[in-house]
Image (tube, grey):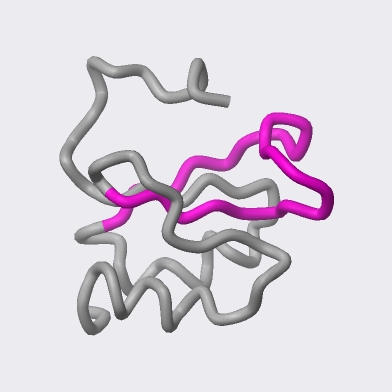
Amino acid sequence: MFETLNPAECTGRGVLLTADSAFVDAARPWADRVDVVLVPESLLPGEGADALLVRPDGYVCWATPTKGMETALATWFGTPA
């Protein structure tokens, strides 16, 4: 999965890796702070993982199947624009 992220493209922003376009739409209010990368589900670790929210320091701060992506986005990246 990490080969998907090109280190030369690191922006110091959060990254949402997802195989489900519904998460792309849900993360849109944080587009000024979080990059969204649509990836094949096979690249996401774990059973039933459709999305991972990664902090700028590389730690995963939220993952499916856990609910509450908007809460995680607000916690780590502030209120939506």
In this view of the protein, which residue sits in the foreground, 48 or 26?
A: 48
Magenta residue span: 34-55
Q: Position of residue 32 (x, y in %)?
A: 21, 60
Identify which residue is drawn at 25% across, 45% down.
Answer: 56
Which residue is the extreme one toward the right?
A: 47
Q: Residue at x 45, y 79 (%)?
A: 70
When the figure is inspected, residue 6 is found, relative to residue 59, above or below; the finding is above
Q: Residue 69, position in %: x, y?
A: 51, 74
Q: Nearer the viewer, residue 20 or 2?
A: 2
Q: Position of residue 51 (x, y in %)?
A: 61, 54
Does residue 38 appear to the left or right of 15 in the view shown?
right
Q: Is residue 64 positioned above or below 75 on the image? A: above
Residue at x 50% of width, y 63% of height: 62
Is-magenta flag for residue 54? yes
> 75 above or below 38?
below
| Residue 72 picture location, percent across and down | 41, 74
